Image (spheres, rainbow, N blue to C red):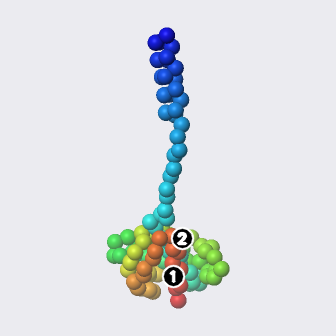
Amino acid sequence: MKITHSILALGFVLLTACTGVKTISTGLENESFLEFTGNPAIYTGGVNVILDNKISFTATVVKDHTSSVKGTVYAISTGTHILSISHNNNLIVKKQIFVSAQETKKIVLP
């Protein structure tokens, strides 16, 4: 009789231990995005971008679409950044920008 009660108790514990409410709480990812717009014919091969004098990458320039983001976007961290953009070793734009979480900042090239 003791063995039967022990087996029933163990079975009850195993059944109740496997179920439960699992909740997940998420917020916005801590990243933002850059999109470079201008005349792609002028900036063939893309532009060279230097972020905070540390990170360097080549970005594709797309035609400006005011209704939505249509071009390639580049993920960066949120906050204040110094952005230097050059093409064929000629500095085009150098400015300080601020981007918040999940914001896509459109950089318009002349």
CA neighbours of label 2 inside 10 A, class few (<14), some (14 to 19), many (20+)? some
- Residue at the spot 42% in from the left edge and 69% down from the top edge: 77
Residue that lies at the very extreme toward the front in this rendered image: 1
- Residue at the spot 52% in from the left edge and 32% down from the top edge: 16
Residue that lies at the very extreme toward the left in this rendered image: 53
Residue 91 vertical position relative to residue 5 in the rendered view, above or below = below
Q: Which residue is mark 2?
A: 73
- Residue at the spot 51% in from the left edge and 46% down from the top edge: 22
Q: Relative to the observer, which residue lies in front, 2 or 56? A: 2
Kindly state the secondary structure of the residue where label 1 is placed.
strand
Give the residue type at disc 1. Answer: Ile
Q: Relative to the observer, which residue lies in front, 41 or 95? A: 95
Inter-mark Cα distance, 1 to 2: 11 Å
Measured as percent of width and height from the top left, residue 95 is found at 41, 85
Q: How many marks?
A: 2
Measured as percent of width and height from the top left, residue 23 is found at 51, 50
Measured as percent of width and height from the top left, residue 94 is found at 40, 85
Give the residue type at disc 2. Answer: Val
Q: Is residue 21 left or right of residue 49?
A: right
The label on residue 107 is 1
Q: Relative to the observer, which residue lies in front, 105 or 42? A: 105
Mark earlier in primary sequence (1, 2): 2
Residue that lies at the very extreme toward the bottom in this rendered image: 110
Residue that lies at the very extreme toward the right in this rendered image: 67
Measured as percent of width and height from the top left, residue 42 is found at 56, 84
- Residue at the spot 49% in from the left edge and 62% down from the top edge: 27
CA neighbours of label 1 inside 10 A, class few (<14), some (14 to 19), many (20+)? some
CB-based contact (under 8 Å), mark 1 and mark 2: no
Q: Is residue 96 visible?
A: yes
Kindly state the secondary structure of the residue where label 2 is placed.
loop
